[in-house]
Image (cartoon, helix red, strand yellow):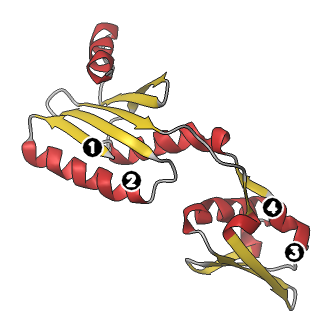
């Protein structure tokens, strides 16, 4: 994975590069290249994230966790931490937050016994959450306070321009053009 950061602030650019490297390790999408341009004076953050196509099959609970029911409760032991937050949200939706506890990062307890066929429930479809995951990743990289987001999709890439103030159409086009390779 290539990470390119352009900024007038060399120390800031290095910090963004390190943050992107760290966050990319926990990211469920395979990234080819990240290009970022940061202009702190103008208040503009621009990024282009090139990714591999969303491939693979649906992810079921059985793919990422084992379950064991006993005494009216079910414990899920997580085998693939990548989807742990997705599983937790799924269980909250299915049983309610009051019925679901997470005693540690690799176990989730549901206060009811669960049928075996529940383990075949699909909790992740690559095409469905793919772009949302990329946008979330880029939001984590952008400086706080950059509330105005413009997103453009290319084949196998997503471009974003985030700013503190509304940019003119001409300026926005300029920034997007600088990211397209």
Between the C-alphas of marks 3 and 1, the distance is 44 Å
Residue at (27, 43) in percent of width and height:
3
Nearer to us in this view, 73 or 179: 179
Between the C-alphas of marks 3 and 2, the distance is 34 Å
Between the C-alphas of marks 4 and 2, the distance is 30 Å
Nearer to us in this view, 112 or 57: 57
Between the C-alphas of marks 2 and 1, the distance is 10 Å
Disc number placed over residue 87 in the picture, else none = none
Choose the circle earlier in sequence order: 3 or 1. 1
Assign a secondary structure to mark 4.
Answer: helix
> Do residues under tags 2 and 1 come within 8 Å of each other at their CB atoms?
yes
**Quadrant position of residue 93:** bottom right
What is the x, y in percent for residue 104?
A: 57, 82
Between the C-alphas of marks 4 and 3, the distance is 11 Å
Q: Which residue is mark 1?
A: 3
Q: Which residue is mark 3?
A: 114
Image-based side of 128 in relation to 70, left or right: left
Choose the circle earlier in sequence order: 1 or 4. 1
**In the image, residue 59 above or below residue 160:** below
Assign a secondary structure to mark 2.
Answer: helix
Q: Which residue is mark 4?
A: 94
């Amino acid at each position: 994975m290539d990470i390119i950061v352009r900024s007038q602030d060399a120390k800031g650019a290095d910090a963004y590069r390190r943050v992107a490297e760290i966050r990319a390790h926990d990211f469920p999408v395979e990234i080819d290249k990240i290009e970022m341009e940061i202009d702190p004076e103008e208040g503009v953050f621009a990024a282009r994230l090139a990714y591999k196509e969303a491939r693979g099959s649906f992810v079921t609970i059985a793919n990422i966790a084992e379950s064991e029911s006993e005494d009216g409760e079910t414990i899920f032991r997580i085998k693939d931490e990548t989807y742990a937050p997705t599983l937790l949200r799924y269980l909250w939706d299915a049983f309610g937050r009051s019925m679901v506890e997470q005693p540690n990062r690799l176990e989730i307890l549901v206060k009811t016994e669960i049928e075996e066929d529940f383990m075949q429930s699909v909790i992740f479809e690559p095409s469905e959450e793919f772009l949302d995951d990329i946008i979330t990743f880029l939001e984590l990289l952008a400086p706080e306070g950059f509330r105005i987001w413009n997103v453009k999709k290319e084949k196998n890439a997503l471009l974003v321009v985030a700013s503190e103030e509304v940019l003119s159409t001409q300026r926005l086009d300029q920034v997007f053009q600088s990211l397209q390779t």
